[in-house]
Image (spheres, rainbow, N blue to C red):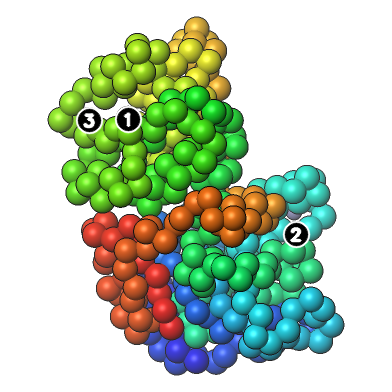
């Protein structure tokens, strides 16, 4: 099969490799859509952030936001057959640790993610391993959803995890810092929860312009207008009930505490590069305003299923997040689009 194989940082080659061998309990899937994510970019650029996250072998096929059609099932697989349309919650937990048993399979110490530790969807075929099948990671795609939509359910489920952590509620004023694809997905979920006002900030005008189609109530460029004053003016001097920091910026994390209202909730959605991860925060703001500061990473299989159901309900339309489609052979173009932010979400179509 054809696959985009990462040989090392900055070295991805489209080449012919063996189609994955299918064992008992496995499902072999013919990829129909796989979306490029910030995580893919980071791994492509600087390698894996944890040595244990990289999985076996020197090479990897990335792509954890993936959907396709079942090509073949291994011995003992029940509930799936060739022709089924499927997607996968990519974080496969060990299944027995406390985190897994609580349903936090994405926080399992021994989790293996498709497209990160295991070969993923930037290929003609991807193997969904027996453990993923047995633990419920593999989901059938609801009839009214396309493969593309199913593929980007994964980042939607991560945003849902962030939203749940900071309890976005009807009537809230929500500020989302970062107008990328993740910002767009947060806007949709915030609206679904009944937020009364949704504000987005970004230092890049083009991104603010691109996100207008998702209908934020305010789009603010803090290099042009002071963010604190603007947020206070938009919220009758109270501040934002919820601040979601969806960008890798220590300054944004620091400022989030100032922009939050009394009893506000904050989510650090984006991780920071290692060399800038120690951020001085004014903890008195947390204390005197009774703030709740949360962090989230990835999503559980349960959350993944929830957002797939939300998509199937039609209450959220994520199609406009996909702004580019690229053939597998041209995957370099997809990565450069993601890098220079000229596309929100780029989907690879094998
Ligand atoms: Zn992702
Ligand atoms: Zn576990």
Dot placed on the residue nearer the N-terminal end, 1 or 2: 2
Question: What is the CA distance from the residue labelled 3 to the residue labelled 1?
Answer: 12 Å
Q: Is mark 2 within 8 Å of ligand 2?
A: yes
Q: Quadrant of the C terminus?
A: bottom left
Closer to us: 284 or 71: 71
Residue drawn at x 69%, y 52% is: 302
Q: Residue furthest left?
A: 224
Q: Residues within 10 Å of mark 2 (few under 14, many from 20)?
A: many
Residue 251 shows which numbered tag?
1
Task: Nearest to the eye among marks 3 and 1: give it.
Answer: 3
Task: Nearest to the eye among marks 3 and 2: give it.
Answer: 3
Q: Position of residue 85 (x, y in %)?
A: 62, 77
Dot placed on the residue nearer the N-terminal end, 3 or 1: 3
Dot placed on the residue nearer the N-terminal end, 3 or 2: 2
Question: What is the CA distance from the residue labelled 1 to the residue labelled 2?
Answer: 36 Å
Q: Position of residue 223 (x, y in %)?
A: 18, 32
Say which residue label 2 marks.
94
Residue 222 shows which numbered tag?
3
Q: Secondary structure at mark 1?
A: helix
Closer to us: 88 or 80: 80
Residue drawn at x 70%, y 47% is: 104
Residue drawn at x 63%, y 56% is: 309
Q: Secondary structure at mark 2?
A: loop
């Amino acid at each position: 099969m054809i696959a985009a194989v990462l040989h090392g940082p900055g070295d991805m080659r489209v080449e012919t490799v063996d189609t994955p061998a299918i064992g008992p309990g496995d499902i072999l899937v013919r990829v129909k859509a796989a979306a490029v994510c910030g995580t893919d970019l980071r791994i492509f650029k600087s390698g894996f952030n944890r040595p244990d996250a990289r999985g076996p072998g020197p090479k990897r096929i990335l792509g954890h936001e993936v959907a396709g059609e079942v090509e073949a099932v291994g011995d003992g697989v029940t509930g799936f057959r060739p022709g089924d349309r499927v997607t996968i919650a990519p974080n496969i937990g060990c299944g027995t640790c406390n985190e897994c048993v609580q349903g936090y399979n994405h926080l399992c110490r021994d989790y293996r993610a498709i497209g990160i530790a295991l070969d993923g969807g930037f290929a003609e075929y991807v193997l969904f391993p027996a453990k993923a099948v047995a633990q419920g990671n593999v989901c059938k795609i609801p009839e009214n959803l396309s493969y593309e939509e199913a593929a980007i359910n994964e980042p939607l489920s991560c945003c849902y995890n962030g939203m749940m952590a900071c309890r976005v509620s009807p009537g809230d004023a929500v500020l989302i810092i970062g107008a990328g694809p993740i910002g767009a997905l947060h806007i949709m979920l915030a609206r679904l929860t009944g937020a009364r006002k949704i504000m987005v900030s970004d230092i890049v005008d083009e991104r603010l312009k691109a996100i207008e189609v998702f209908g934020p109530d305010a789009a603010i460029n803090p290099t042009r207008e002071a963010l604190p004053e603007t947020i206070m003016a938009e919220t009758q001097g109270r501040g934002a009930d919820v601040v979601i920091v969806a960008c890798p910026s220590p300054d944004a994390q620091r400022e989030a505490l100032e922009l939050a209202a009394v009893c506000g909730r904050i989510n650090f959605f984006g991780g920071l590069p290692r060399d800038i991860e120690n951020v001085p925060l004014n903890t008195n703001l947390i204390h005197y305003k009774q703030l709740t500061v949360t962090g989230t990473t990835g999503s559980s299989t349960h959350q993944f299923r929830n957002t797939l159901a939300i998509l199937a309900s039609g209450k959220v339309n994520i199609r406009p997040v996909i702004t580019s489609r690229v053939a597998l052979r041209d995957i370099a173009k997809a990565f450069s689009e993601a890098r220079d932010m000229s596309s929100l979400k780029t989907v690879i179509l094998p």
